[in-house]
Amino acid sequence: MSGGSLPPSLRDLVRAVRDPRDLESFTLAQWDLLLPLARRSDLIARLACVAEAAGVIDRLPEPVQRHLAGALLLYRRQQVNAAFEIEELAAVCSERGLRLTLLKGAAYFATNLGFAQGRAFGDIDILIDKRQLGELESLLMREGWINAIDDAYDQRYYREWMHELPPMIHIQRGTVLDVHHRILPETARARPDPQRMLAAALECASFPGVYVLAPHDMLLHSATHLFYEGELTHGFRDLFDIDAMLRTVGPEQSWRELLERAQALQLTRPLYFACHFTAELLDTPIPPFVSARLAQWHPDGSAAQLLMRAYRLALRPMHPALNEPLTGLARWLIYARAHWLRMPPMLLVRHLGRKAIRGWLGIQGRPVDRPAPKQH
């Protein structure tokens, strides 16, 4: 694996997760950087899982074993908690005949996808018909879920312009829930139809009555989430997710269906970025005819070339060892682009101006206190 433009330490991390048989050859100096990078990129539990599955974890240096064992312990606890939360949400939705569709990490877990082993996630993300939002929110509040944000402007921002309700938090368990009614904000330039995605959703074998997006839609949503996001805290992990899904697309006809689906949902540009950067950074095999078709969606001009360079830096895990002189600028450009894609110009100016003034004055929206999670 060449790793494209990745620095050597990050290539080591990719190699470790891809082929854990190489782990025994790593020196302590390599581990000293590899473990912090794995934590920063949210890949340490995945690294621990593949090392355990390969039977090499007990042959690694003792300090490394302790780190990986701790990651496995936390991950398995998360699995228990996630299953509990999904079952609770399914019960709430089934009471009124609402269909629960999981997104992102919760969906990968519920469908037991191969790359979901060790795939950490914090919040539970769900997608629901917008017409059912009010009813679902009332049901959730009755079950102990409350808004995690009580600032009036932020509440309005979410409810009028965004693609989700304000984050909700359970008053006893501390779990955070994001209730989506679209995969992009109401004000975004691209407008993928959520009804088409919900109509194609598939029921989970492990959680009857719970749905996930169809495979192509799941991949397109992951790509859209990553390449419309302004803060790439887990960008490298998300790129790993996309790489794994692209490697399972299948025969030529399935690739053609993916391209057609991207066009139908107005998500061709995120798919272009996803294929381009997974191929460049993770050596994802993209069929030549797909690359040729995607080339028509390549952004043009000098600004586009600057954007591509910015992503090469911003997609790296946030660790000082990976920073370059322009890393800060690259992350700022991605942040600005995300807001530009999500909002019309006047709303964008007003929103960012308000954020800047509040930041300068030291005023922040007051989040609801988050309680310590209970055991379950």
Image (cartoon, helix red, strand yellow):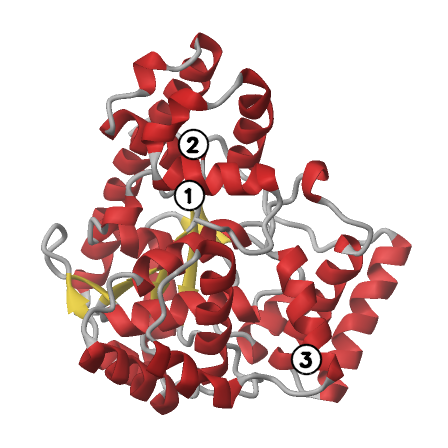
Q: Earlier in the sequence, mark 1 or mark 3?
A: 1
Determine which quarter of the picture holds residue 122. top left
Identified at 28% across, 73% down, the residue is 216
**Residue 152 at least partly seen:** no
Q: Which residue is mark 1?
A: 175
Q: Which residue is mark 3?
A: 304
Q: Which residue is mark 2?
A: 373
Determine which quarter of the picture holds residue 49. top left
Q: Position of residue 71 (x, y in %)?
A: 41, 26
Count residues near mark 3 (Cα–Cα under 10 Å), then give few for <14, some for 14-19, many for 20+: few
Residue sitting nearer the eye, 276 or 99: 276
Q: Position of residue 300 (x, y in %)?
A: 65, 87
Q: Position of residue 109 (x, y in %)?
A: 27, 48
Q: Tell me: 329 left or right of 274.
A: right
Q: Earlier in the sequence, mark 1 or mark 2?
A: 1
Q: Tell me: 311 left or right of 198.
A: right
Identified at 26% across, 65% down, the residue is 101
**Alpha carbon separation for disc pair 1 and 3:** 39 Å
